[in-house]
Amino acid sequence: MARRTGSADLPLHGGRVPPWLAERMATLGAIITQAVVHHYGRDAFLQRLSHPFWFQSFGAVMGMDWHSSGITTSVIGALKRGLAPFQDELGIYVCGGRGRHSRRTPDELTALGERTGFDGVALTRASRLVAKVDSAAVQDGFELYLHGFFVTADGKWTVVQQGMSDSKRQARRYHWHSEGLRSFVDEPHSAIDGPSQGEIVNLTDHRADASRQAQLDLLAGLGPDGIAHEYAELTEKIEAQGDLLHLIMPAHHDVRSSDVFIRRLHGTLAAAAERGPLDFPELLLTPGVAPAPSSRWRWSPKSSTARHIASVIRRVSRSRMAARTVIRFRCRSRSMTRPLVC
């Protein structure tokens, strides 16, 4: 199937690629792509795109020599434009992009599937799951805003997507490749490399399988009302909005757990309960469980339903196994391989 192949941490830089450089990048990127496909094949090109070091070097050779977040946007945009005239000849198609373009990925894949014959529905599901995993299942403080989906005529694909942390002034790029993965939610990551980011919630760790199953059990057992009630008690949150309209704005700028609108959380849980997900990937695919990619370059920290349900699990579950359901990682220098269990 597919696997997460790596990631890259990049500094945030302002500015835009000038039109003359964007045009040259599109032309040169198309020529290099044709050469790689001609000598090594389409699969080899996808494999290279899924390697964070190769992708970074590719962007520099194309002319984007800044070591910044903009290299991801410019390379994907240049390839989408440059390969458009040759996509049927090469059998390589580029979907998605930044912000609103990323949200068009499902429609683009569906249209390509109808035209070329590959399974557009399955690829759309893969695109959504990859985005959900890196935004809701792995909560590392980076909000996704860019999603590039490279697919071949025979249905093989590579995803390059990127998130930002405005507070850290950093971007993180995630690479996926459609071979070698048994599950999207159980140990899909082959590497995460970068400086320490503190503690994160990682629901894709194999030892978090109990947490993933407990979230499904809680949704079926407690239901939306029970989970929302437990979450309110967990956070000791008093509903601020009464029958009369009254706006209360907090003194802090960032969005915190205490700022979660419980009635909106209840609505998302009700939608998930109505869908009746049979496994964790289906729960992640519920609308509202994870934030949609942002079209802006500034946003607030994510606050996903998956994290709220996991918080409830720690309060309501009594067994030792359930108490170990949420796996947190303290990011050590250059790796995230040493787990700390809550």
Image (spheres, grey):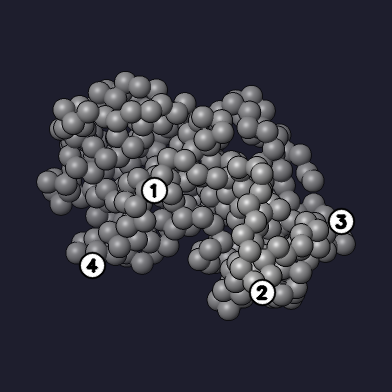
Q: Select label 1 or label 3 by which is in front.
A: 1
How far separated are the C-alphas under marks 4 and 1? Answer: 28 Å
Question: Where residue 99 is drawn, which disc sits there?
Answer: none
Question: Where residue 243 is drawn, which disc sits there?
Answer: 2
Looking at the rendered structure, the secondary structure element under dot 1 is loop
Task: Tell me, yes or no, whether the two marked residues, 4 and 3, touch with CB atoms within 8 Å.
Answer: no
> Which residue is found at the position 22% from the left and 28% from the top?
18
Query: Does label 4 or label 1 sit earlier along the sequence?
Result: 4
How far separated are the C-alphas under marks 3 and 2? Answer: 42 Å
Q: Give the x, y percent position of residue 232.
A: 76, 63
Question: Where residue 295 is drawn, which disc sits there?
Answer: 1
Which residue is labeled 3 in the image?
Answer: 320
Query: Does label 4 or label 2 sit earlier along the sequence?
Result: 4
- What amino acid is found at the position of numbered circle 4 in the picture? Glu
Q: Residues within 10 Å of mark 3 (few under 14, many from 20)?
A: few
Q: Residues within 10 Å of mark 2 (few under 14, many from 20)?
A: few
Q: Nearer the viewer, residue 277 or 181?
A: 277
245 to 326, vertically: above or below: below
Looking at the rendered structure, the secondary structure element under dot 2 is loop
